[in-house]
Image: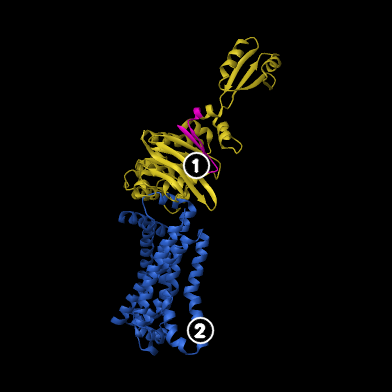
Amino acid sequence: MTDILSIDRATKRRGKQLTLDGVSLSLAAGERVALLGHNGAGKSTLMKLILGLTSLDGGEIRVGGTKPGSNAARLATAFLPEAVSFHKSLTGRDQLGLFARLAGVGMTPVADLLERVGLADAADRRIGTYSKGMRQRLGLAQVLLGKPAVALLDEPTSGLDPISRMELYAIIDELAAQGTAVLVASHALTEVEARTDRIAILRKGRLVANDTLASLSRRAELPTKLRIRARAGEADRIAADTGGQRVNGASVELLCTPEAKMDQLRRFAAMSDAVEDIEMTPPRLEDLYRYYAQEDAQ
Amino acid sequence: MIGRILAIARTEALIVRRNRWVFLATLIMLLFALALTFAGSAPTGTLGVDRLTVAVASMTTLSVYLAPLLALMMSFDSIAGEADRGSLALLLSYPAGRGEILAGKYVAHLSALAFAMIVGFGTAGAIAGATGGASPESVTALLRLIGTSILLGAVFLAFGYMLSGLAGSPAAAAGLSAALWLVFVVLYDLGLLGAVVVDSGGYFTQHIFPWVLAANPADAFRLWNMAASPDVALATGMAGVSASLPAWAAPVSLGFWLVAGFVLARMAFRRLEP
């Protein structure tokens, strides 16, 4: 697999502080990668570097083999800034038309794209009358112009209602299916969890994780939570036997490592006289994120 | 490249038209030009020139104030506003260079300004000529006034872009533009006037003052129109200064500021990190 976007030990200084410290990350065509991190972790700086809007202090970035900021790289890259806004006097069609002309694809795809993001009815209204979600969808429409090789989406779900979020992820899937490498910076962890192939986590300018969700959870060895609902009066005995924690009267909660999980399950299955039900919660992205992104981890 | 400049110019033209900027600028030019033409028509007889000449003289004084003002008001928001909205980063992620973006905006704003000047001064001049007589000389003076007003506006458009690129926010850009206007159009002349009064006809007044005056694009504009038309100079009472300078001084000054303004604007824009 060839990498359409390759970032090699990218370093960026702001004054004396390192905003990005030797970050290496690659995206192959059609890959969807979530970029997570606290505010100020360097997500937006990384995107600006990929776009060539600011210069590197060390390392190298290649977009489709070319330097960021070159015409070829700009043509290959689509960008959705965080909370984007446009001139209020222009209509959605004017604004998208400008981008289409700059991208060299002409006005032909504009009407279809406005339709695709649900702005067909508002196409000839001024952007000043748009809601935040509509502006965000207009921003999304310009990402779809001209089949980009790389799409950088900075907090694309901010300001979107749940239905629009679903549509956004459908569009991301569509982009990936046509071969676009998609890098999504997001705070909406639960959505990212289901909708991306790989997760990269930045902490204070360093890449602290870059793998699939499954591998990350294996490496973090975060415990799986078992919740056992006991038959009447048996909860205390189960808690005492297994060292679990009594919760809400009839249930016992127990944390176990991924390796010990099957042994524990067999044990409870054998206690069919005392156990009514077992509920199993594997570690969620939130737990993983906390594990990797927090100061005291590792 | 031309295609991208035109795409940006087209969009900016839509914005100035929808903002009613073209309409307002034209209206302001027209009203002031008409008012001055008729208010200033009284001394026609005493000076022995036709009404159009007097009108051009009045409109020259008007344009010194209005052309820079309209130009700065059109341009101050153009970069700072985009940066503020977050659309500058997006625009720069497209294959449009910063020079192309600047050129596109310039084409649109200059066209709007030129339209206002041509309609405003043209109409007032036509009415003055029709009611009070005109001559080939005074028609040439009117055409020169329109052309140099557009050039003066072009200089201050470039200044506006420069300030817009330097200022961190649209509000700061507006403040800087107002200050720049005040300095070039009002304070500079006041300062020189004070110096001339103190000097009372000495070496400074005779040899340095005209050059210092010509170095200011707004005054260069005034001098150009005076020097080229003795009648207009007579009507504005600036015959003395324009006579002591070579004819090329004022055009060179305006030309220099036009290029310098654009270079400075380009440099300010290059420094800007969206």
Figure check: A153 above or below B223: above
> Would you say residue A196 is visible in this rendering?
no
Residue B145 falls within the magenta-colored stretch: no
Q: How many labels does the image show?
A: 2
Residue A204 falls within the magenta-colored stretch: yes
The hue of chain A in the figure is: yellow
Give the x, y percent position of residue A153: 45, 42
| Residue B274 numbered mark, or none | none
Residue A41 shown left or right of residue A142 in the figure: right
Which residue is at the front of the view, A130 or A149?
A149
Element at label 1? loop
Name the residue type under label 2. Answer: Ala
Which residue is at the front of the view, B125 or A293?
A293
Figure check: A32 above or below A145: above
Which residue is depicted at the point 30% across and 56% down? B2
Quarter of the picture holding the N terminus of chain B: bottom left
The hue of chain B in the figure is: blue
Figure check: B61 above or below B95: below
| Residue B195 numbered mark, or none | 2
Q: Give the range drawn in magenta.
A: A197-215
Q: Report which residue position mark 1 lands on.
A: A155
Mark 1, residues whose alpha carbon is within 10 Å: few (<14), some, or many (≥20)? Answer: many
Element at label 2? helix
